[in-house]
Amino acid sequence: AIVPEASTIEHDHIPIIACNRDLVFKAAADLPRFGHGAFLTCLETLYKRISGNDLKYTAFVGKPYEISFQYAETIANKIALANGQPKIDKVYFIGDNPDV
């Protein structure tokens, strides 16, 4: 297939929602493993090369994005209230990655 010149692609792309931008993660093996962020990097690079434009994400979900924490807090409060407990005023999140 022939790849069109970047300047000929003028339309927007479909909405993209991404999660887990970790480039690598540690597993049982000694060497790090590629994470979902590696796929996103490839996708961004391919899109830029073909279209000449930056890939635009509609949203990022999952850790460490605020929308995920807000959802968790909302659900925790619903459960607390359903069990006769007061609204939770402090929420602490513990992650699996010191960079997050």
Image (cartoon, rainbow, N blue to C red):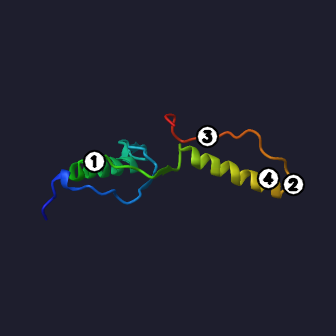
Q: Earlier in the sequence, mark 3 or mark 2?
A: 2
Question: What is the spatial separation of the Cα atoms under label 1 and label 4, in whole angstroms?
Answer: 46 Å
Q: Are marks 2 and 1 in contact (CB under 8 Å)?
A: no
Viewer-nearest of discs 2 and 1: 1
Residue beneath disc 4: 80
Res. 94 mark: 3
Q: Earlier in the sequence, mark 2 or mark 1?
A: 1
Horizontal placement of 13 versus 3: left or right?
Answer: right
Question: What is the spatial separation of the Cα atoms under label 3 and label 1, in whole angstroms?
Answer: 37 Å
Disc 3: CA contacts within 10 A as few (<14), some (14-19) or many (>=20):
few
Viewer-nearest of discs 1 and 4: 1
Going by the numbered disc 1, the residue's amino acid type is Asn
Res. 53 mark: 1
Q: Earlier in the sequence, mark 1 or mark 4?
A: 1
Residue beneath disc 2: 84
Mark 4, secondary structure of its residue: helix
Going by the numbered disc 3, the residue's amino acid type is Ile
